[in-house]
Amino acid sequence: MPFDALVAPAQAAPLSDALARHGISPVPADTLASHKQAQLERFGPSFWYRHRQWLAIGLLTPIGGTVLGAGLVSATPSASPLPAMLCLGIILMSGFAGLILSDRLRLRAGSHWEERWLPADWLESSAVPEPIAATARLLQNDLPGSTLIVGELVQESVVVDPYLLLDYDGQQVCLGIWDESGVIALAGDQPPRSIRSA
């Protein structure tokens, strides 16, 4: 029908149009990718975690030596060097126990990135910095049906380093990256430069 175009509901503007209309340049995709890789390396597994098989052998060897030594001591004359070996095994086990109890021997596992949907009402309670949250609210009001995605670097259930994406119709833009010290990267006040497909 010739009048269908007049009564059809207005379609929401594409993501790039909304960014241009508000003069917002998202954080470039390569900046986010390099940041994510750098943080994975920074919060990688500890030396002891990477070599935990050798640590287990190091902990079990003195125990086995002590048990073997105790058995041999009871079966040999008192002039044997086995009591000294038994003492050495006990000292080594005590040393490892001391390292573990003093938390100097940390078995910190590696970190990984997780992404989850974030309702706009939860921006403040999720500790998203206000400049990033303001940009997210502005774009989400302009793009009905868009969703916010928060990416978090998780290390042993602790969130270390988040970022915020806006997803609209299969396209994603990064609105900001932050950590406990503040904003690392923020969508700027220039024409958009970077849109990555989901």
Image (cartoon, rainbow, N blue to C red):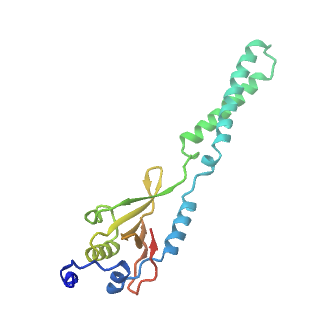
Instruction: Say which residue appears at 68% left-offset and 41% top-offset.
Output: 54
Instruction: Say which residue appears at 34% left-offset and 66% top-offset.
Output: 148
Snapshot quadrant of residue 103: top right
- Determine whether 81 is above or below 142 in the image: above
Please state which of residues 145 and 139 is positioned toward the viewer in this rendering.
145
Snapshot quadrant of residue 159: bottom left
Is residue 161 visible from the viewing direction of this image?
A: yes
Percent from the top left, x then y, of residue 141?
Answer: 25, 75
Percent from the top left, x then y, of residue 109?
Answer: 54, 49
Please state which of residues 76 and 54 is positioned toward the viewer in this rendering.
54
Q: Quadrant of the N terminus?
A: bottom left
- Determine whether 178 is above or below 80 in the image: below
Percent from the top left, x then y, of residue 91?
Answer: 67, 32
Please state which of residues 87 and 154 is positioned toward the viewer in this rendering.
154
Total labels: the figure holds 0
Instruction: Say which residue appears at 19% left-offset and 84% top-offset.
Output: 3
